[in-house]
Amino acid sequence: MTHGFTKVREMEIAEMATRAVIYRHDKTGARVLSMINDDENKVFGISFRTPPEDSTGVAHILEHSVLCGSDRYPVKEPFVELLKGSLQTFLNALTFPDKTCYPVASANVQDFYNLVDVYLDAVFHPRLTENTLKQEGWHYELAAPDAPLTYKGVVFNEMKGAYSSPDSLLYEHSQQSLFPDTTYGIDSGGDPAVIPDLTFEQFMAFHRDHYHPSNGYAYFYGDDDPDKRLEILDRVFSEYEPIDVAATRVPLQERFTEARSVRKGYPASDRLAKGMFTVNWLLAETADANLNLALHVLEHILVGLPSSPLKKALMDSGLGDDLAGVGLEADMRQMFFSVGLKGMHPANAVKAESVIFHAIKELVDNGIDARDIEAAINSVEFSLRENNTGSYPRGLSLMFQALSTWLYDDGETEGDPLALLPFEQPLGNIKAWIANGDKIFEELLARLFLHNPHRTTVLLEPDHKMARRMAKEETDRLASAKAAMTPEQVQAVMTEAEELNRLQGEPDSVEALNSIPRLALGDLPAENRVIPSEMRAVAGCDLLFHDLPTNGIAYLDLGFDLSVVPDELLPYMGVFGRALVESGTSERDYVDLSQLIACTSGGIWATPFAAPVLGSDEAASRLFVRAKSTGDKVAATLDIVGEILTSATLDNKERLSRIVSEARARTEQRLVPSGHMVVATRLRARSHAANAMEEAMSGLTNLLFLRDLEKRIEDDFRSVAKDMERIRSLLLGRNHLILNATMDADMFAAMESDLASLINRLPESDSGPVKRTVPAFPAREGLAIPAQVNYVGKGCNVAEHGFAFTGAALAVNKLIRTGYLWEKVRVQGGAYGAFCLMDRVAGTLSFVSYRDPNVADTVAAFDNVADYLADLDLNNDELEKSVIGAIGEMDAYQLPDAKGYTALMRHITGQSDEYLQTVRDQALAATPKDFRDLAEAVRINAKHGDIVVLGDSLAMENAGLDLEIEQVL
């Protein structure tokens, strides 16, 4: 026994160079998984089983609310204070259908302990009040006794945004259709129509019954002291007496005896809007490691590649624009599989369903192509060994994987958090079964798909009256609520809302703020972390080499200079990049090419890039062809890249039509969940040639181009094919190429001659740079979509008006985002978020909001940032926190491949190590004057900034901003 814990089990996980120890707290029964390794990016998480019984969003609202002040840290937003002044590499909270997780991460050990301390006090000792529920959940707002009643609340508006996304709705309906009798059959995030049913008593009871060590799952990962982990937890857990948490267990869904179907609508404004559907199967419990991994491989076989048999059958059917469904969902107690089509006429759902079953039956009857199996196993194995979690800490990914089996027990047998983490044995088993000739994937398809009656079909149809109907239902409900109020109750609503607003605007005391632990400026490294970079020449081309430990994987980027592509061809670049990799070559069709890429490499893909160059009006723009491979397959991977670049099939009408329709559908899908970035991209496009290129290649302009391109492919394919060939001849020349290699020196030495051979296969191009134009958009632009919320933006190029950003602006930006904008736009305005985007290279300033119920009030809040900064009485503590937070963002933790790519981006945009060090020095030396000086940039934006709003047309019409409104979806 150590610090009140008894060790239950210990395991060495060689695949992850990690020792895993499971503990049980003797007094309360709390569970701990301690992952011990040498990863400096330390992770902690405290999670609870939180299966809700209704769709009021109580678990989600509570997730927000416990981070609004605690006993030891009695500030309004400890979470925000940590965001301001921490070196955190991850800081958030997440609600899932059956659990709520509070993870933090940092590479600085003292910062890590600070984060752990604040989060533990937050979840176990929150200062929950009725005002907390009103702010984060919902409350009534009333401007005057005779004014209409309205709802306001952060989660309320967040979920209005979610319910405006057809893809989110399809996922929810698909999951719920399979689990009608369990917690998975309701919306843990909250249905906006049901959220106002949540009472304060229910809210408090949910915390009491679920946020207790007996229901807790604590997790540590990294190179911190394993003994101290238990000491920290015992101090908190020992305050409690054990409770019975049997009610939080997640039961199994009883199996259907026959398939079911569901038809739902989604809000649509365009009468040409199409439907979407999924077929969904309930599979098996998560915890069987062999079955779990086999199903992940099977998912890749079915839909993982453009040429995968089920995906190919659906796309070749011509019944829809893109695949729908999440594929394999394996984060809950019982796994399910979901697949279908979007962009489909609802009348074709029966045909599409028959396509799915015919494709599966063909695989069962005739067997799966051995190359598809090899490609899937190689891809899954590469992903497991690479363990590339992107910007997520690796430890966080493992935490979620552990919870997918740890969380579930039947009262007698505990869930095992280590069931799925060691992958060598199940991977070896699958390979052995395949080598033995066992038809394991065909058997799974027959048993879990073809002959499984626990299946649902979900059809989501466009409803052009739904948005207005939902708005009317909400208005009627509010009118009825107000009509039932006495004059005294009406006054009470106004008084309570005013009091909430007063409390939201009231600053925390200095004593309360000082309670939040943080680092001091002296704890920060004065020097930037320099990414190893060496400029070399290979076959006459510049190559940036990064000698980094990559665990035996080679990462290679080939960047072709887009300066030679004229404006009218730029919108093709996303499609052109996909066509290179997904259309086949002169030597093989796209099916063979997809299989070959997956069997040989960790992936080959193409992506366009454009960014401003420091001190220039020019753009750094490239089409990057990116590849990754294990060392033994580098030569073969480079050979495939060479084949793609020299002989890709660009005139296959059917393939190009599929790629374009998928791209258009995905861009439309992105409008709601990523509306703030659509707005930000649109705003920046007016200010710099590079940003105009970004808008043309990936913004709303690109969506309009893709819609037109679909028609041109049908009506005038010869001109489209001619454009594609012209791009190839202009762009894919070795004299327009820069290369980037991230791997260790020995691996690079072994591949250099193969890389030179690849370069020598490329032709010379006689094309030169073209002149760029910046598009003229309306100064006040409204982009209408069928959404219940808005995305509001205002921005301009302040450098053109004489303002120059320094590194100190990074610290000011941190305070604006986590201070003024958080309070005015999120807390008081009810939006889910707001951002201040400063581009010190291009000199642009933009403000954008996310899932926002307001329009005009948000624009006013953006403009008022100037007065906030000018009048700011900044104490030293707030100054230091802002600086620490800014440095934390500069020093964001990166995996080796990301480091190499970041170094390349800096190189082509002219940001040298010396320049970046100057920026850091300026940020570290920030003074209150720098904060006040930035008010001038905001005043410039207030006066000259353009406005872009993406959202509800009626809200834009009523905003009084003279927006030129265009329906875009």
Image (cartoon, helix red, strand yellow):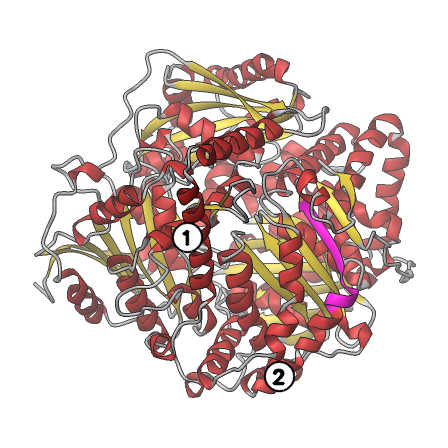
Q: Give the range drawn in magenta.
A: 941-950
- Residue at image x 42%, y 14%? 260
Crowd class of label 1 (few under 14; some 14 to 19; many from 20; radius 10 Å): some
> Which of the numbered marks, if any, corresponds to residue 448?
none
Can you identify the residue that label 1 sits on? 496
Q: Quadrant of residue 231?
A: bottom left
- The answer, for residue 560, to whether it is visible in the render is no
**Left or right side of 194 for 857:** right
Foreground mark, 1 or 2, reads 1
Most foreground residue, 300 or 143 = 143
Look at the numbered disc 1 and give the secondary structure of its residue.
helix
From where the camera sits, is residue 627 visible?
yes
Image side of residue 118 versus residue 561, left or right: left
Residue at point 82% right, 62% down? Answer: 689
Front in this rendered view, residue 919 or 93: 93
Q: What residue type is labelled 2?
A: Asp
- The residue that label 2 is drawn on is 930
Q: Which of the two discs, 1 and 2, labels the residue nearer the N terminus?
A: 1
Judge left or right: residue 882 versus residue 396: right
Q: Which quarter of the image is occupied by the C terminus? A: top right
**x, y percentage for residue 5?**
11, 60
Give the Cα distance between marks 1 and 2: 38 Å
